[in-house]
Image: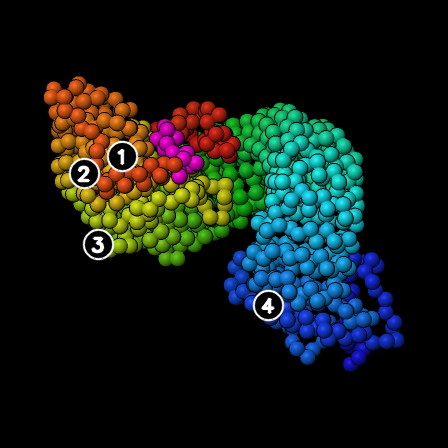
Amino acid sequence: MASLLWFAHFLSFLLFHLHFQAGSSLPFSFNSSSAPMPCQHDQSLALLQFMKTFSIRSNASSWDFLYPKPYPKTESWKEGTDCCLWDGVTCEIETGNVIGLNLSSSLLYGTIHSNNSLFLLPHLQKLDLSNNDFKQSQIVPQFGQFLNLRYLNLNHSVFEGQIPLEISYLPALVSLDLSKNPYLILETFIFNELVQNLTQLQQLDLSEINMSLVGSSSLMNLSSSLTSLKLSECQLLGKFPDISHLSKLVLLDLSYNNFSGEIPSSLENFKQLDTLYLSNNNLNGQIPSLLGSLKELSSLDLSYNNFNGEIPSSFENLKLLDSLYLYKNNLSGQIPSLLGSLKKLSSLDLSYNNFNGEIPSSFENLKQLYYLDLRDNNLSGQIPSLLGRLKKLSSLGLSYNNFNGPINFQGSRLSRLEYLDLSNNLLHGRIPSSIFKLVNLSVLILSSNKLIGEVSSAVCELNSLEILDLSNNSLNGFMPQCLGNFSNNLSVLHLGMNKFHGTILETFSIGNNLRYLNFNGNQLQGKIPPSICNCINLEILDLGNNNMDDTFPHFLETLSKLQILILKSNKFHGLVKGTSTNYSFSKLRIFDLSNNTFNGPLPAEYFNNFKAMMIFDLNMKYMGAPNYSSYDYSVSLTLKGLEIELVKIQTLLTSIDLSGNKFTGEIPQSIGKLKSLKLLNLSHNQLTGNIQPSLGNLTNLESLDLSSNLLVGRIPMQLTYLTFLEVFRVSHNQLEGPIPEGKQFNTFDSTSYEGNLGLCGFPLEKCDSGERQQPTASKEIDSKSKIGFGWKAISAGYGCGVIFGIAMGYVVFKTRKPTWFVRMVEGERHRKLKRFSN
């Protein structure tokens, strides 16, 4: 029994040494003739007391991304047993002292105070509390009491506040990891003390800690013994630091900071460097050829900078390079064929640059390549068939280039391909059947090309498909009916802006995962099938610009997640009378029934249920596929008679367009509840009565079009409180009296009012009686106007002016320019947007 106990202790200690690579530097000696000492009693009590400090998080969803999976190690800790055998505890064999405590990913939840029994373990040499939740605890000064500590890891454990000076009292530290605690702050004085005292430090990771107060020059004082330095996303500023004395570095990560200038020549001294990450800074100039002398490099990331010129020829020397990321720079010229000689490359990303010419034939040698992204360049020629021979390729992005010719993957061996995006090119011909044999595809995007012909039902053999986008081509024939029920994985189905005819999919299966369904701009007929209610996760339904002949699909009310409904420019008819339930269309933000033949009164019941339009949401996001951040949802929208395509939809955008129908009766007062509404178009109907003063409550409104109706009476002066209003039209009604003055009403020209013979005042002729309608109102309205002004101040940061943005977007879609506008709005994400379709 004693020998088994001794062996257990020995094995635990040996694993501890191997895992943390401590080697002989940890105190270790034992006499084979003597049994190991059991855990010291006082240290066992300290551990038990430490365990009682925390609860175990029953819901571990926040750690689901971790590997290995989190589990409660402290559940093995039982009073009366040898603590040296407890999970996560390592003891010194000769003394029984606890020298290692590894409770990473143990689901611990609680606060570490200064009197915690953890600090009664003075012999600790290794302490790992990473990937837990310490509820924004401070790192208390007592951590400085572990004078024997060599490894300290508090990564991703929800600490906050100042990093204490006492951390610098640990002179034996070899590895310090405080990263991924974004609420931690490191001041210049503390940092200087750390680098001055921790002279044995080999590994330092302070990523995602606020170091904005630390000057870049302070990095010059780091210990020359460092082999790994990670300071990613630390808000560091200034010129790229001179750290030439860190010649032992194997890993250097200074990414996602704000360093400026050029890469210094001193970097050439880092002959042992394996990994270099400098992305998301403001580095400029040409990529220095000296990087080609770092022959041990396996991973190089210079993305998100301002490098220009060509890829240096010295990169031919980087024979060990596994991953190369140069995306989002200003690099130009042809992609050098030398990259094809880097046969160990598995990931290559040159996207969002200005490369031209063809893909080099030497890429055929990249047999290990599984990720290739060349999107958003000026590449041309045909897509080379050699790409189809890269057996390990899993992701291929070639969108937003000038590739032409047919899609040629005939005889390809891309059996592992999961992601394929060839959109926004000049590809023509039919979709080859070989595409539908790529059975592992989860994303297939062929939009905005010149593809023709029918879509084979073989597309439904792609059972793993999550995104299918074939929009903006010249595809014709019937839509494959199997698309409605072939896979529960499919979340995006975009076949808009083609020439499909017949009916839309008749059967949508129960349990499907569709979130985005867009058939806009085809020649579809018939009715909307009730089975679409099986798409319980549907967020966007766009069936606009077809020939569908149906009444309003009231059954869509059951789709509780629906945010955008577009049925415009069809042959829909009849009443649009909503139910009295509070749940119908409660999340709807865009409601477009324009250019149909709906009649009867406006749907006041629905207006009462549009809860999402009643609350102004400050959290601006873009709608997109949940598992693929690079795929944005898009919809078509009509403005000033022009149809444009929004390739990105802000969650702040709210719109109601019921124009071009035969609606009758008065404008319902309930529409004044929709305070987040930005665009309202009720024009070209047969509406009667007065303009509702309650429209003055729509304090975020930017466009109001009531033209071409039968409205009478005066323009309510409450509308002067719409301080965001950029477009206002009441032309061709039967309005009379003076036009309100002040604020936005001083900006509208006469076209806003033409066709109303009884109107007078600016910008029309003066009223004969000199009568003016001054912007005075009740206290209630005045209060609401102040709220509206407040929203203006609050939302200024989001860039109000949806109308300007949409109008400029139209220019971009028509011309694919100007680049300055795309960069301003999209943050250089898409320098070439989707083409406009007539």
Instruction: Measure how far apart labels 2 and 3 are at the Cα level.
Output: 22 Å
Instruction: Measure how far apart labels 4 and 2 are at the Cα level.
Output: 62 Å
Along the polypeptide, which appears first: circle 4 or circle 3? Answer: 4
Residue 730 image-quadrant placement: top left
Residue 41 image-quadrant placement: bottom right
Res 294 seen here? no
Query: Which labelled disc corresponds to residue 580?
Result: 3
State yes or no: discs 1 and 2 in contact (Cβ < 8 Å): no
Determine the secondary structure under disc 1: helix
Along the polypeptide, which appears first: circle 3 or circle 1? Answer: 3
State yes or no: discs 2 and 3 in contact (Cβ < 8 Å): no
Determine the secondary structure under disc 4: loop
Q: Is residue 796 magenta?
A: yes
Nearer to the camera, 764 or 623: 764
Query: Which labelled disc corresponds to residue 698?
Result: none
| Residue 220 in picture, x, y percent from top left | 74, 38
Q: Which residue is mark 4?
A: 53
* Rendered residue at 68%/59% (across/down): 142
Disc 3 marks which amino acid?
Ser
State yes or no: discs 4 and 1 in contact (Cβ < 8 Å): no
State yes or no: discs 4 and 3 in contact (Cβ < 8 Å): no
Q: Which residue is mark 2?
A: 692
Nearer to the camera, 758 or 315: 758
Instruction: Measure how far apart labels 1 and 2 are at the Cα level.
Output: 14 Å
Res 44 seen here? yes
* Mark nearer the viewer, 4 or 2: 4
Along the polypeptide, which appears first: circle 2 or circle 3? Answer: 3
Q: Which residue is mark 1?
A: 721
Determine the secondary structure under disc 3: loop
Q: From which residue to which does the magenta span run?
A: 794-807
| Circle 4 residues within 10 Å: few <14, some 14–19, many ≥20 | some
* Rendered residue at 79%/35% (across/down): 269
